[in-house]
Amino acid sequence: MLRFGGPFTTVTSQTGRTSLAIYYRISLTDSQFADSQRNSNFCFQQVLSYPSRLNCYRNKATTEAAETMAASSASPAASKHALISLSDKKDLDLLATGLQELGYTVVSTGGTASALEKAGISVTKVEELTKFPEMLDGRVKTLHPNVHGGILARRDQSHHMEALEKHSISTFELVVVNLYPFYEKVTSTNGVSFDDGIENIDIGGPTMIRAAAKNHKDVLVVVDSQDYPLLLEFLKGNKDDQQFRRKLAWKAFQHVAAYDSAVSEWLWKQTEGDKFPPSFTVPLSLKSSLRYGENPHQKAAFYTDSSLSEFNGGGIATAIQHHGKEMSYNNYLDADAAWNCVCEFENPTCVVVKHTNPCGVASRVDLIEAYRLAVKADPVSAFGGIVAFNKEVDEALARDIREFRSPTDGETRMFYEIVVAPGYTEKGLEILRGKSKTLRILEAKKNSRGKLSLRQVGGGWLAQDSDDLTPEEIKFDLVSEKSPEESELNDAKFAWLCVKHVKSNAIVIAKNNCMLGMGSGQPNRVDSLRIALRKAGDEVKGAALASDAFFPFAWKDAVEEACESGIGVIAEPGGSIRDADAIDCCNKYNVSLLFTGVRHFRH
């Protein structure tokens, strides 16, 4: 989680959260304890998957509960209590049956009580603990000394225990809580009113979670139903594993912090609405551990952003991988660059990326033709690169991707790390899978506009609006004597859309909706120009050139070299103190010059 001024588990509520407390008195004989250990070890050692553990507990608990209850009633022991408060009742039957197996008695309210009664578990209402009715439409239910005293009391402090005894308060050894579905409510397609959003902010739940997590030495806290099997194994093991308790406490605090970040993000938008609040938190959830980072000696992991602003926002982070090796750190960076670029185009387009730079871009009605032209722009760089499409990949296109030979020799079959598209036909996907066992095939949704862009620097983060401007939103002002032909203006807009995705200093040369060459990442604009001209070759005559920033010099510099090479139209932001030189130079060589007033630096 990034905090500016924390993984995120969301739940789906079926009914409002209800609370329950569970008590047990149990004393096992040596043989019963040994049987319990054997059964617990079977679940832990032999059944590894989460669903298998669920089935294991459900099957065992049903047959053993009666025996265990009988054993617990036969001999007295110290009582232990568990408090459970759930909105999402997923696997409540697993938890309750497993606890019943150990001889628990349940105290509950509302929907949870009904669910437990249906499961055959006797229920006592929580009001009998607090001696106070639920009030204020459920806002006050568990906020009571009889609840929080039992959670927060330190067992190693005699005066704490004396205070509990004085006020007849029982301790809790287990707290299981999940929260009101705030995230789901405020991101629902039907929308949510301000008052409804406020009513879905949980108060009692986070309070109990934080209390139990703080006192985790004595109180186990669980916020995720997937931890139920491990919890039951732990309880059956009768061990005092502080590391296990600390991990659950960490998860609990993270859960509440991420929940609070969603509330904070939503509430800020309801008040100021500005993108840059005085402080904010970004909830991150681990998606995968990576083999290594940018280089093999660097450890790495990949996280998804659970911010409300990213809900249904598309992008590579939420892409579906249909085939191939696991994604690497560099794969994510390159796939993101390719996908962001190709999604800028409305017409059927193919983009080829290498080391986050588009080395080939082409738009055509026929996507196969677009693919071939994109590769042709720089086949050497395209080999081992990422290929992205903004339209569905069908059987014909997939076959061409699989069989296409490099334009450099006409023999070498093109190799790619990743293919990414918004969708695939069934046959298209089948054919692509046959190209290589390692080829990563991704299906992604288009990035939504207006996102906040974050970038880390030493000791801090930079935040900015994403660069969403398109040529349709930019005015291409003619400043030269020669006006461009309509085709030249279209080429200039195409080149301009490409250059915003190339690392600065960036130059793109394009013609007929096809990138002919690009120069990127050079410390000076002249070198980037020369690289682009070399890649474009003889096709440069009459082509359009786009520069991501203004030209600081013109004569005997980049502008004049471009004019001398045969470029037909130049598009650049303008804004240099020597703009007049650029205009005069273009007029001398009869080249059209367009000022956009918009810079597209990319570092």
Image (tube, rainbow, N blue to C red):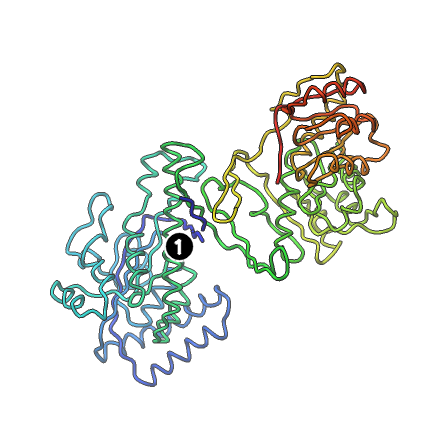
Q: Quadrant of residue 222?
A: bottom left
Given residues 352 and 541, the one toward you in this image is: 541
Q: Residue furthest left?
A: 166
Q: Residue furthest top?
A: 481
Above/below status of 516 relative to 48: above
- Residue 358 drawn at (x, y percent): 70, 41
Above/below status of 248 relative to 34: above
Residue beneath the point at 23% across and 66% down: 154
Q: Quadrant of residue 573?
A: top right
Name the kind of residue labelled 1 in the image. Gln
- Residue 427 drawn at (x, y percent): 72, 48
Left or right placement of residue 408 versus residue 478 in this view: right
Above/below status of 458 relative to 150: above
The C terminus appears in which quarter of the rendering?
top right
Above/below status of 448 relative to 571: below
- Residue 106 drawn at (x, y percent): 26, 63
- Residue 97 drawn at (x, y percent): 35, 66
Residue beneath the point at 31% across and 77% down: 67
Circle 1 Cα neighbour tier, 10 Å, few/some/many (<14 / 14–19 / ≥20): some
Q: Residue furthest bottom?
A: 31
Q: Secondary structure at mark 1?
A: helix
Quickly name the residue at label 1: 254
Number of marks: 1
Given residues 441 and 578, the one toward you in this image is: 578
Given residues 93 and 127, the one toward you in this image is: 127
